[in-house]
């Protein structure tokens, strides 16, 4: 190689090195900007444990929900619990149970008359006014009942304020924070609705699209805790919080897994629950789909796999668990967590799942919680409603 060729080779090599250094610096700056000033949650990439291992349960009980001709539950979309009643949204019905599980009544029926609805999208509780408020997307109205089932009023809204509504939380005075289904090219995830004026503000959108189906980004993508509402976004390792300025990053989960870029998100035009699964299977970060929060813990259900990430808020460290249980069950598993009541995580346990778990508990178990669960299953009728399970963690 001649001198001139050698010098040309050195120049090209230096340019390549500089290029990759600049790319690395840009990536580092982008990462730093993404998490700037955000507290970090560690532990996500650590060993995945079997369900319930090393989780200290301070208090545990199971609540059967009475089955009558009116109170049959096929699935549970949302649960709200107040001091006197348990409210359960099951398919197109809103049911009320007493705190001991006895059936107490049902709100409204399908129809167009006052107090009736065509489609019950979801509901919310006003604890101060002691009212239950049903949302009907098709008739674009909010129907209000007392806790005890007395019809009070309904308010109609012009336009499509509840279009593709999936769930909601009351925030501030006369405002609702709403999450929506992704449907075709309708990609609005979160909106803020003023219940007085009907004004709707878009807070967050996504590049995701579907093909002629409506898909939620999660079953419980929002969690009320104290005066705050935490929010999840698809394929994101950040947890967000809503305030008067909108939805902003709150904390981030440290992970070595690759995150989807905005360009990769735009290419997902047939989004479904399988999209989460596919991303997880190829080893990338699929994100979280559900969030629940107690005084001490935050529980995040993972997207794409049957796992949860239990975060100790004091240490800012989490542990991942498989929801699936071992053949021989020696510790109490957490199941189907959907909400929090006081400082209890509340899960849903269908009858068939209860039997499957009880069958895996050794007959000679010395764990009082597992013994209680196995005994309870043996006394429950085969055609029973799903049960609610309450866990208070140490």
Image (cartoon, helix red, strand yellow):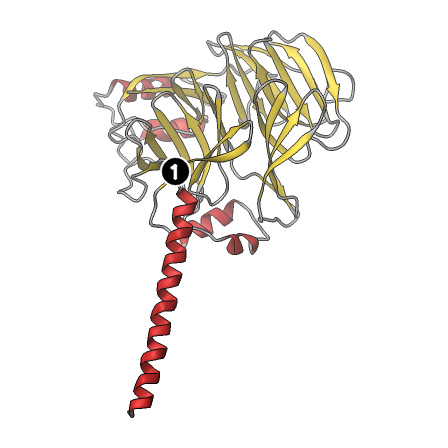
Please say whether residue 283 is visible from this viewpoint: no
Residue 112, image quadrant: top right
User: 170 left or right of 305?
Assistant: right
| Quadrant location, the N terminus | bottom left
The crowd level at tag 1 (other Cα within 10 Å; few <14, some 14-19, many 20+) is: few
**SS at circle 1:** loop
Q: Residue at x 48, y 20 (%)?
A: 227
Taking 292 as reference, is 14 above or below it?
below
Q: Nearer the viewer, residue 270 or 293?
A: 293
Taking 332 as reference, is 323 above or below it?
below
Pinpoint residue 254: horizontal percent, then vertical percent. Answer: 34, 43
Q: Nearer the viewer, residue 356 or 76?
A: 76
Q: Residue at x 61, y 19 (%)?
A: 94
Q: Residue at x 53, y 56 (%)?
A: 263
User: 40 left or right of 330?
Assistant: right
Pinpoint residue 237: horizontal percent, then vertical percent. Answer: 42, 42
Q: Nearer the viewer, residue 351 or 246?
A: 246
| Quadrant location, the C terminus | top left
Q: Residue at x 40, y 26 (%)?
A: 354
Pinpoint residue 277: horizontal percent, then vertical percent. Answer: 45, 48
The residue sitting at the bottom extreme is 2
Q: Nearer the viewer, residue 196 or 11?
A: 11
Q: Which residue is mark 1?
A: 37
Residue 372, image quadrant: top left
Please say whether residue 272 is visible from this viewpoint: yes
Taking 77 as reference, is 42 above or below it?
below
């Amino acid at each position: 190689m001649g001198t001139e060729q050698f010098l040309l080779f050195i120049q090209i090599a230096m340019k390549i090195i500089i290029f990759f250094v600049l790319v690395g610096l840009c990536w580092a700056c982008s990462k730093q900007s993404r998490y700037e000033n955000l507290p970090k949650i560690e532990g996500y990439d650590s060993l995945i444990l079997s369900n319930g291992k090393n989780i200290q349960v301070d208090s545990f009980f199971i609540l059967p929900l009475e089955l009558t001709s009116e109170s049959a539950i096929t699935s549970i979309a949302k649960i709200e619990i107040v001091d006197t009643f348990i409210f359960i949204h099951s398919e197109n019905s809103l049911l009320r149970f007493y705190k001991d599980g006895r059936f107490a009544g049902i709100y409204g029926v399908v129809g167009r008359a006052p107090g009736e609805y065509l489609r019950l999208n979801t509901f919310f509780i006003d604890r101060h006014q002691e009212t239950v408020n049903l949302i009907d997307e098709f008739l674009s109205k909010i129907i209000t009942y007392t806790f005890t089932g007395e019809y009070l009023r309904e308010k109609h809204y012009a336009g499509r304020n509840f279009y593709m509504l999936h769930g909601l939380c009351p925030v501030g005075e006369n405002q609702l924070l709403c999450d929506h289904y992704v449907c075709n090219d309708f990609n609005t995830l979160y909106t803020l609705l003023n219940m007085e004026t009907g004004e709707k503000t878009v807070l967050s959108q996504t590049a995701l699209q579907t093909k002629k189906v409506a898909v939620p980004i999660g079953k419980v993508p929002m969690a009320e805790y104290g005066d705050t509402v935490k929010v999840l976004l698809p394929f994101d390792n950040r947890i967000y919080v809503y305030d008067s300025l909108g939805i902003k990053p709150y904390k981030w989960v440290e992970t070595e897994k690759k995150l989807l870029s905005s360009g990769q998100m735009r290419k997902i035009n047939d989004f479904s629950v399988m999209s989460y699964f596919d991303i997880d299977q190829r080893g990338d970060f699929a994100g979280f789909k559900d969030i629940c929060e107690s005084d001490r813990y935050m529980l995040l259900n993972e997207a794409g796999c049957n796992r949860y990430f239990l975060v100790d808020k004091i240490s800012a460290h989490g542990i991942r668990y498989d929801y699936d249980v071992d053949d021989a069950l020696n510790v109490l598993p957490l199941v189907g967590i959907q909400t929090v009541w006081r400082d209890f995580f509340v899960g849903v346990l269908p009858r068939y799942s209860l039997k499957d778990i009880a069958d895996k508990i050794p007959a000679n178990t010395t764990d009082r919680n597992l013994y209680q669960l196995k005994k309870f299953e043996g006394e429950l009728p085969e055609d029973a409603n799903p049960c609610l399970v309450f866990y208070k963690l140490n």
